[in-house]
Amino acid sequence: MSAAGEGLRRERVTLSAEARPPAEALSPRLEDWQEGVLSLRVVDPGRLVVKAGAEVIAAGALGWGEDQRLRVDPLEAYPPEALPRVVNREPGREEVEVHVPAEAGAGELLTLTYEWDWKHAGKPALVRTWRLPPMEQDLPLSHVD
């Protein structure tokens, strides 16, 4: 729930090289977006970057540690505070979340890019996009005489 008590929009994406045919994984999907959460189920290891317009709102290397549990490590090119939040480390149900504030990159694209590691390295990256709604102050004012 948001501070105003309204429900957040939740978009689920599975980070799997086998989940969708490559052609479908590469086509952007444009949707209206409100303040919400990207829930990301981690199936295959990789490098995640989520941008709202030009601003990076999440970045991290997702994979499994020696204990076979999900690890989220910072990427050198991005600040450590951009790490996605781990919400489930249970084997087979690994999941992270990225909070997308309503004001982030208003009117631009929310873009998720996931580049594969390990056995899927070299495959085309998974790319998903959503249209962020314009902020209220960016909407044209209607003129009433």
Image (spheres, rainbow, N blue to C red):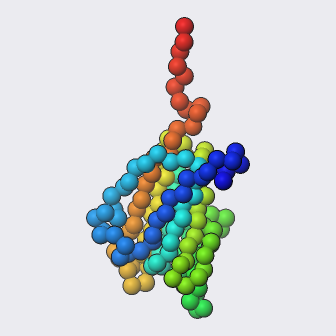
Residue at point 64%, 47% (across, down): 6
Quarter occupied by residue 4? top right
Question: Where residue 16 sits in the image (x, y, percent)?
Answer: 41, 74
Question: Where residue 82 sits in the image (x, y, percent)?
Answer: 62, 63
Residue at point 60%, 44% (across, down): 103
In the image, residue 8 above or below residue 124: above
In this rendering, position of residue 65 left or right of residue 21: right
Quarter occupied by residue 21? bottom left
Question: Where residue 132 sits in the image (x, y, percent)?
Answer: 50, 46
**Marker count (numbered):** 0
In the image, residue 85 above or below residue 109: below
Q: Residue furthest bottom?
A: 66
- 7 or 115, which lies in front? 7
**From where the camera sits, is residue 69 visible?**
yes
Q: Residue furthest top?
A: 145
Residue at point 58%, 62% (across, down): 98
Residue at point 49%, 63% (across, down): 12
**From where the camera sits, is residue 54 visible?**
no
On-image quarter of the C terminus: top right
Question: Where residue 18 sits in the image (x, y, percent)?
Answer: 35, 76
- 94 or 76, which lies in front? 94
Q: Residue furthest right?
A: 3
